[in-house]
Every structure is written in structure tokens, then in C-alpha cells.
């Protein structure tokens, strides 16, 4: 149930401003691909084009192709809502829906899509998703308490449970640990390790050690100069990026010479 | 840059991906349409107000035998009809001016007190109590003005006449001090005070801390800080607060209708009984008006609508220009 | 050696302290000036130079301002004297503003409370002449609740939807012209006098469409008066909902309209209810539009669509302008009832705001 993503000649615009230019890359199924690079290089923007969330910002659009198992997700006969159902996302700051309980948060994607599901079926989904997010044991006794009452790390795992409850093919993670403490970060990284058995994962991170720890492939993005669009500098197996990068800019960034 | 990397051979699209579908949902279309209609309904209401007032006031214009703008009398149902808004305009303007003179400095003082002088916890309570003042219905202000304030204003009116009587507006030849433009103005001042203080308070609290601290760091006293840092920043906001207060004073109806004795004459002796305003005139003459009378009242309402519209548009214009300016920083 | 050194050091700190402190009025200075002024004013009162409580107080304030500013000028210099004068003025402005609030609420309480009785709330004015005592405002209470309720039923959905348009849909529209026009006229609408709205309903619905004067016509006017407040508060609340929340809902494959209905609006619900209640409180006391769109009535009529229907503001107007002692007393009773009603709405709005605010944290 994991799919591959291919991006070809992708340009990203916010109105007349070109934020990212000429990105071509492939994301392999059942693996973790990390996007690294300095702030403002467009790595989050690229991530958001993969589930068509980019276009909810007024004036934002792309040119180029994004293929999900060979199918163009930007083609006219594709419904962005279905794309997002297939490609889930976890955000930088944990953001459970504040008006909903833990249980309602997990099932939100299922109950709000219009299809009717039996209670038993939903119960199953809740347990399966929370177990999948390594959260079940911590919250099983308080499923009807507000999701906002959990700790930051728990909230983020709840958001992951919410994302995997709709059974996506791909999971996008936009700096999922940057708002968390080190212990919660480790818990999330362990979880990513497990999730990649079933999902294709793309993770944006500021933390190079994290990229080195969790990913098989790493893509390095950079900003040639202020005001210019961000570019993909190189994408390669993580081992190679961190030991023997192909580009000087990558090496400079990895070794902490800038960024 | 590894753009040389070829796009890998991809498997043929599988039908099972399930991402195809109509991207336009009926729910989205309906909900967007409904909310758009609601927005348009507001615009429509505003234009319909103008349209209906114009349309329904035309009959009175065609039969009026006097100049609408320079006549003081109000006898629209007489044959031939004679009526005009001169006295109404005079009364509306004078009561509002008195209200502004009293309420603007006090309102700004209150706003300063709450935002920069009072203790933090205290200021929340004070802000709430000025909001309460705004919640008191105008009819109650009218009753209070008539039964409580009028007897208390007697002494002040006499004093003004005795010592400042050489100025026409303070002179009182009748010895009666009730139901006057002056009292109406004072009541209006109390009524618009919350508007002015609430809006000024808002801009005062928006003054960047940096400006305030920079001024204090230069050794300014609190008052010098207010003059150097707060007033220049908040000036456009204070002006529009005053204008919005003016808008409210111009259109205030019931309180004025209760206080004034509704005589359509122009009398510069503000402490003597008399005077009338657009709004009060409508409320007081509504039930006794014939068809021309109603149309004439609608015509006066149209004038009031236009005046308040202009005042509000100018006030909002000042605010929004200021907001854009601030946004540019 | 050491002691001499430390002595020198002490002297220099005290010099520095002098420089920092400057010459200021003693701590007790303000209180002393205040007390002296009060005493002096009281003395002048006893000597019959001034009379009346208000006059005496005014003289005391004047003496205080002169005394404090003068003393400060001679001791602290011009800048501090001006500062003290400004502080006094600001405090005075506040006192001036609070006085009428206390006076109005006090008058309503003192004059209104004696009228309160079980009968006052359970009977109408049917068969009660203006001169006789008794009667009640049951009919007016029903009318106000129905008219205001109907107005909310009309005004709240339109206002909330318009705010949804402005916040959720307008930014992505091709042209901002419609939304900025709506936004602008919502602001302008706040300033349209209520009597003009009453005129509009009269001309449009009664003169043109031929509908009778009724409680419903009044509700229409009140709904228009509520609209701008509801739009503004809802807009503000919707803008407070983090964009993340919308995006994570969309990222789950939840359609846009369901995201707004089930995630965004519930998150902002507390604030929206607060705004709605404040707007209801604001229009509940409106008198002018009711005078133009309803007929005064002395009897109970629970059907807002048919026949004359009373309301609290028109009840107060009618009783007050009838001008007898008994009717004026009833008017004050009505005023107290109206204020209590509005205060309940206000307190309710504050409680809801606090409750929902706490839930988020």
C-alpha cells in the first residue's frame, strides 16, 4: 500500500514570485526520503506540492509534473481531495482539532468525508491507528478527553494517528519534531522507522542528524541567492550525501559552513 | 545540480490509485455560493436603504411649497405643505457639537487612563465598565436626562447666564433651563463617550512598546512620553474615533426626542427650552403624520442618512489609510 | 586606609542618588495637598462662600490642581509640574466618565425597583389606565424576546456566512473588489442611525410590499442593526483559527466546505456566540426602529407576524410619555427590566468567552 512519487521539472510560484525552480526527483516506496536545506530554500513548498496543499494558498500554483505511481496528480480529471486522502501529511506544530476528543480526532478524516461507517468499524480504526502511532497504551483510557490536553509529543503522535487513519499511500512530514523536546523527538523517529514498512515517507527536517538517522535518501535544497528561487542541489542515498556529497554546496551545508 | 538525472521509467498508471474524480463538489459550490450571497446581501441592503429612501421621499419634494433646505417650519400635512430642515439641521449640528466638545477630551482621557495610567488589573475592570455604559439603551439615557440631569443642570445654566450671559449661547431670557439643546448635548456626550474611548483605547494599546520605551529611556516624564510616542502614532485613530462618535451623536433618536421639546425654530440660546433634530423629529411626528408628512419625514431621514454616511466614510477612510501605512512598515 | 576609602565611596553614592532622585515631592505630598484642598473647600462651604456638594467638590479639585502643580513647579521644576497636571487631568477624565454610569444605573435601580412585583411581570397593560397603578410588562417582555429572537435567527446566519465569505473565500477570489466593498460597507453600516433602518423597513416592507406593521417588521430592522457586529466579531474569530488547522483538515482529504463547517467554525464557536449575544444586547434596547415599524399595544400578543405587538422599549416609551406618576414609575420598572436583560446577555457572553477561551489552552 505504498506508492512511488516522481517529480519532473517542477516550478513553484506564489503569485508572480517564483519560489522554487526546476525540481526533478523520485521518491521510492516504503522508504524515507529526507528534504534538507537552509530556511527559505523551498523544501517545505516542494513537500506541499506533493499533496496539492500548496494550492490552497491564494495565488499559488505550479508548473511541471508530480506523478503518483505514474499518474499525474495535477491532471484535470484528478480531485485534489482524493489526492490528499491518498497522501497524508503531518505538520510542524502538533495541531489536533481543538473542539474534538482524542477519538474524534483520529476518526475525523473518516467521519467528515461523508461515507457512513459503523461504530465497530470506527472503533477498530481508532485502535489500529493509535497503535500504529505508538500512542494507544498512553491514551486508551481517555479516548473521550480533548486531544488538546495531551503533551506536545503525544499530540504530534495523535496527528500521525489521524493521518494514517485514512490509510494513505504516502505520508508527508513537515519538520514534525521541530516543536518537540528530545525525548518526544526520539519517540517520533522510532515511529517513522516502523511506519516506513507500510508507507512511503517524505520528511522535511532542519536537523541533519535526524535526516542521517531516519532516511534512506536525502535531497538537499539550496537558495542560490536572496530573491532567487530555491533549487534542488542533489538527491542521493543518505550515506553518500553525508559521507561523499557530489556538490560543494552540499558539503558546505553538511559540515556547517553555512545555513 | 543533478538535473541531469533522468526521470525513471515509471510503471503504467494503475487504475487503483483512486485519485481521479470530479474536483468540483456540490457541497463546496453550495456553501461558497451561500456565503457569497450573504456578503452580497449586505451590499444590497445598503443600496436598498438609499434607493427606498430616495423613492419614498420624492412625493414630498414635489408638493413642498417652501425651500426644503432653508425653511424651519414643519407643516407637511397642511395645504399647501410648508416644511424644511433648517431648524432640524441646526439642532442636530449644535447638539452634536456640544457633545463632541465635551466627549472627545474626556473620552481620550479615559482611554489614556485605561491604557497607560491605571493598574493592569484595574484597567480590565474599567474597560468593562465603559463597555457597560455603551450597553445602556438610549431611551434610558433620555429618561435619566429628563428626570435626573435636568434638575442638576439648573444651577449650572443659571451660573452660565449670570457670568457668561454676554455670550449669546449662554444667555437665558426665559429663566427656564429644561428641555434645552445644552442638556441634549450633555446627554449625547455621555452616550458617545464609550465609542470614543473604546476606539482610542484600541489605538493607544497598539503603540509599539519600542516607541514608548525609547521615549522613556530619553528621560521623558509620563506625559512627555504620551505626547512624543502615543499621540503622534494614535492621531489618525483618535480622529476617526471622534468622527465615529460624531456619527452616533448625529443619528441618536430617542434620548434626544425625550429631552427636547421639539420646536422647529433656530434659537442660539442653548440653555433655553427648544430645538429639534432630524432623528428626534422623525420619532416624534411619525404617528401623527399623514401621507405627505411621512414622505417628508422620510426625506429628512434621507438627509440624515447621507450626513452620517459621509461622516462614517471619512472616519473609516482615515482608519484604513492608516492601517495600510502601518502595514507597509 | 580602608575606612577612608569606603567613606569616600559612600559620599559619592549619595551624590549619585541625589542626581538620580532629583528634587521630588515627598511621597505623602499628593495626599497632603488633597486633604488640605478638601478641608479648605469645606471651610469655604461653612463660610458660605460656595454652596452645594458638587460646587464644594469642584472647588476642592481646583484647589488641589493649583496646589499640587504650584508646589511641584517650585520643587521639581516645570516638566514634572506639567506631568502631574496631566496625570490629574487624566484621572479627572476618568472620574467624569464613571459618574454618569453610576448615576444612570443608580437612578434606574432606585426608581425601577419599587415597581417590581409578581404582578408586574405576569400581567399586561390591558384595562389599566395610565393614571392607575398596577399592570405589568408581560406583553412587552414576550414581544421583545420574540422580536429579538427572530432578529437573531435572521441576522446571525447571514452575518456568520458573510464573515465566512470574507475570511475563507474572498482571499482566493480573482478580484478583491467584492470583498473589500462588503468589508467597507459593513463598517459603514455600523454607523447608520437605527431610525434610518426603521425608515427603510417602513418604506420597503410596509409601504411597498404592503406588509402590516408587526413584530416581524421590527425584527427585520433589528436584524439589519445586528449584522455588522456579527460580521465583525465572527471575522475576527475566524482569523484567529490557525491556518495549520485548516490545512491539516484539508490534508486528511476533508472537503473545503466540511473543513469550514466542522473544523473552523466549531473552533471559533465560542467567540461567534459571544459576538452574537453582544449584538443581541445591543439591539434589545433599540426604540426608534420599533416606533416606526410596530404599533404600540397594551395586550398580550405572542404572534409577531400579526397584529400590534408591544416590546420593552416601546412599553417604556409609551409609559414614560403618558406622563402620569403611575405610568412613569412603570416606565422605570421597564427600564430596570431591560437593563437586567441586557446585563444577563452581557454576562452570558463574557462567561461563554471565558469558558471557550479556557478550553483551548
Image (cartoon, rainbow, N blue to C red):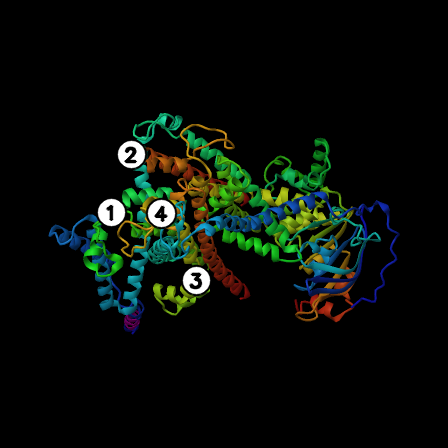
> What numbered label is drawn on residue B152?
1
Asked whether the beta carbons under mark 2 and mark 3 sit within 8 Å of each other, the answer is no
> Element at badge 1?
helix
Circle 1 or circle 4, nearest the eye: 4
The image shows residue C209 at horizontal and vertical percentages of 55, 40
Front in this rendered view, residue C208 or B259: C208
For residue C13: magenta? yes
Whether the residues at callouts 1 and 2 have beta carbons within 8 Å, the answer is no
Residue shown at the point (25%, 59%) measured from the top left: B168
> Which tag, 1 or 4, sits closer to the chain's start?
1
- Which residue is denoted by mark 2 in the rendering? C324
Name the mark on residue B256: 4
Residue A207 x %, y %: 67, 59
Are the residues under badges 1 and 4 in a single subunit? yes
Q: Which quadrant is home to the N terminus of chain A? A: top right
Answer left or right for C1 relative to C344: left
Label 2: element kind: loop
Camera-side residue of B182 and C274: B182
Viewer-nearest of discs 1 and 2: 2
Amino acid at each position: 500500500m505504498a506508492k512511488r512519487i516522481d517529480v519532473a521539472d517542477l516550478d513553484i510560484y506564489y503569485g508572480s514570485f517564483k519560489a522554487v525552480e526546476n525540481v526533478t526527483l523520485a521518491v521510492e516506496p516504503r522508504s524515507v526520503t529526507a528534504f534538507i536545506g537552509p530556511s527559505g530554500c523551498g523544501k517545505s513548498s516542494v513537500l506541499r506540492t506533493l499533496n496539492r496543499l500548496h494550492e490552497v494558498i491564494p495565488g499559488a500554483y505550479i508548473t511541471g509534473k508530480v506523478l503518483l505511481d505514474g499518474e499525474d496528480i495535477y491532471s484535470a480529471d484528478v480531485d485534489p481531495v482524493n489526492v490528499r486522502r491518498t497522501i497524508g501529511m503531518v505538520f510542524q506544530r502538533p495541531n489536533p482539532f481543538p473542539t474534538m476528543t482524542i477519538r474524534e480526532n483520529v476518526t475525523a478524516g473518516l467521519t467528515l468525508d461523508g461515507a457512513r461507517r459503523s461504530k465497530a468499524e470506527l472503533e477498530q480504526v481508532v485502535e489500529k491507528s493509535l497503535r500504529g502511532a505508538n500512542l494507544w497504551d498512553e491514551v486508551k483510557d481517555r479516548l473521550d478527553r480533548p486531544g488538546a490536553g495531551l503533551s506536545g509529543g503525544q499530540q504530534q503522535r495523535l496527528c500521525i494517528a489521524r493521518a494514517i487513519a485514512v490509510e494513505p499511500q504516502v505520508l508527508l512530514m513537515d519538520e514534525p519534531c521541530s516543536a518537540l523536546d528530545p525525548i518526544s523527538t526520539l519517540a517520533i523517529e522510532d515511529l517513522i522507522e516502523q511506519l516506513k514498512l507500510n508507507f512511503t515517507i517524505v520528511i522535511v527536517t532542519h536537523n541533519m542528524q535526524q535526516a542521517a538517522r531516519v532516511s534512506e535518501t536525502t535531497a538537499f535544497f539550496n537558495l542560490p541567492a536572496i530573491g532567487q528561487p530555491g533549487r534542488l542541489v542533489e538527491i542521493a542515498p543518505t550515506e553518500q550525501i553525508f559521507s561523499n556529497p557530489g556538490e560543494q554546496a552540499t558539503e558546505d551545508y553538511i559540515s556547517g559552513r553555512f545555513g | 545540480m543533478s538535473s541531469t538525472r533522468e526521470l525513471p521509467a515509471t510503471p503504467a498508471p494503475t487504475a487503483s490509485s483512486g485519485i481521479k474524480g470530479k474536483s468540483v463538489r456540490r457541497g463546496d459550490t453550495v456553501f461558497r455560493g451561500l456565503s457569497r450571497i450573504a456578503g452580497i446581501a449586505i451590499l444590497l441592503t445598503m443600496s436598498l436603504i438609499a434607493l427606498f429612501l430616495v423613492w419614498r421621499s420624492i412625493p414630498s419634494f414635489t408638493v413642498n411649497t417652501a425651500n426644503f433646505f432653508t425653511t424651519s417650519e414643519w407643516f407637511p400635512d397642511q395645504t399647501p405643505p410648508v416644511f424644511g430642515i433648517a431648524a432640524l439641521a441646526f439642532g442636530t449640528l449644535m447638539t452634536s457639537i456640544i457633545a463632541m466638545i465635551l466627549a472627545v477630551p474626556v473620552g481620550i482621557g479615559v482611554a489614556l487612563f485605561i491604557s497607560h495610567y491605571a493598574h493592569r488589573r484595574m484597567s480590565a475592570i474599567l474597560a468593562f465598565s465603559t463597555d457597560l455604559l455603551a450597553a445602556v439603551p438610549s431611551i434610558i439615557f433620555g429618561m435619566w436626562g429628563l428626570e435626573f440631569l435636568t434638575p442638576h443642570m439648573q444651577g449650572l445654566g443659571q451660573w452660565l447666564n449670570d457670568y457668561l450671559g454676554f455670550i449669546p449661547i449662554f444667555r437665558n431670557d426665559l429663566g427656564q433651563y429644561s428641555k434645552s439643546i445644552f442638556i441634549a448635548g450633555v446627554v449625547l456626550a455621555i452616550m458617545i463617550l464609550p465609542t470614543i474611548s473604546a476606539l482610542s483605547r484600541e489605538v493607544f494599546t497598539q503603540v509599539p512598546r519600542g516607541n514608548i520605551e525609547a521615549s522613556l529611556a530619553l528621560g521623558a516624564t509620563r506625559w512627555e512620553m504620551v505626547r512624543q510616542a502615543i499621540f503622534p502614532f494614535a492621531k489618525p485613530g483618535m480622529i476617526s474615533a471622534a468622527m465615529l462618535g460624531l456619527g452616533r451623536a448625529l443619528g441618536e433618536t430617542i434620548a434626544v426626542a425625550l429631552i427636547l421639546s421639539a420646536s422647529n425654530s433656530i434659537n442660539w440660546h442653548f440653555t433655553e427650552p427648544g430645538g429639534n433634530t432630524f432623528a428626534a423629529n422623525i420619532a416624534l411626528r411619525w404617528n401623527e403624520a399623514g401621507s405627505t408628512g411621512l414622505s417628508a419625514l422620510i426625506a429628512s431621514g434621507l438627509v440624515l442618512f447621507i450626513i452620517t454616511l459621509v461622516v462614517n466614510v471619512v472616519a473609516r477612510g482615515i482608519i484604513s489609510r492608516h492601517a495600510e501605512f502601518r502595514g507597509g512598515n | 586606609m580602608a575606612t577612608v576609602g569606603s567613606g569616600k565611596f559612600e559620599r559619592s553614592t549619595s551624590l549619585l542618588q541625589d542626581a538620580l532622585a532629583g528634587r521630588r515631592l515627598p511621597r505623602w505630598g499628593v495626599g497632603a495637598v488633597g486633604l488640605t484642598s478638601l478641608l479648605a473647600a469645606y471651610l469655604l462651604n461653612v463660610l458660605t462662600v460656595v454652596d452645594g456638594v458638587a460646587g464644594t467638590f469642584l472647588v476642592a479639585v481646583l484647589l488641589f490642581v493649583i496646589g499640587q502643580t504650584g508646589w511641584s513647579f517650585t520643587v521639581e521644576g516645570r516638566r514634572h509640574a506639567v506631568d502631574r497636571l496631566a496625570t490629574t487631568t487624566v484621572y479627572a477624565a476618568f472620574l467624569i466618565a464613571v459618574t454618569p454610569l453610576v448615576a444612570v444605573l443608580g437612578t434606574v435601580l432606585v426608581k425601577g425597583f419599587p415597581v417590581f412585583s409578581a404582578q408586574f411581570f405576569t400581567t399586561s397593560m390591558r384595562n389599566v389606565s395610565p393614571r392607575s397603578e398596577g399592570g405589568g410588562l408581560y406583553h412587552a417582555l414576550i414581544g421583545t424576546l420574540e422580536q429579538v429572537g427572530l432578529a437573531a435567527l435572521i441576522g446571525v446566519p447571514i452575518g456568520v456566512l458573510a464573515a465566512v465569505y470574507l475570511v475563507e473565500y474572498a482571499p482566493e477570489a480573482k478580484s478583491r473588489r467584492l470583498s473589500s466593498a462588503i468589508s467597507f460597507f459593513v463598517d459603514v453600516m455600523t454607523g447608520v442611525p437605527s431610525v434610518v433602518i426603521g425608515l427603510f423597513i417602513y418604506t420597503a416592507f410596509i409601504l411597498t410590499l404592503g406588509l402590516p406593521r408587526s413584530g416581524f417588521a421590527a425584527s427585520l430592522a433589528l436584524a439589519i442593526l445586528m449584522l455588522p457586529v456579527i460580521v465583525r466579531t465572527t471575522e475576527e474569530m475566524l482569523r484567529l483559527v490557525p491556518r495549520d488547522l485548516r490545512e491539516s483538515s484539508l490534508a486528511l482529504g476533508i472537503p473545503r466546505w466540511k473543513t469550514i463547517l466542522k473544523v473552523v467554525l466549531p473552533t471559533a464557536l465560542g467567540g461567534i456566540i459571544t459576538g452574537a449575544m453582544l449584538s443581541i444586547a445591543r439591539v434589545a434596547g433599540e426604540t426608534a426602529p420599533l416606533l416606526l415599524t410596530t404599533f404600540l399595544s397594551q395586550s398580550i400578543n405572542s404572534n409577531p407576524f400579526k397584529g400590534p405587538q408591544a416590546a420593552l422599549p416601546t412599553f417604556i416609551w409609551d409609559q414614560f410619555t403618558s406622563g402620569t406618576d403611575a405610568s412613569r414609575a412603570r416606565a422605570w420598572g421597564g427600564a430596570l427590566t431591560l437593563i437586567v436583560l441586557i446585563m444577563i446577555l452581557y454576562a452570558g457572553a463574557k462567561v461563554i468567552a471565558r469558558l471557550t477561551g479556557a478550553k483551548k489552552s
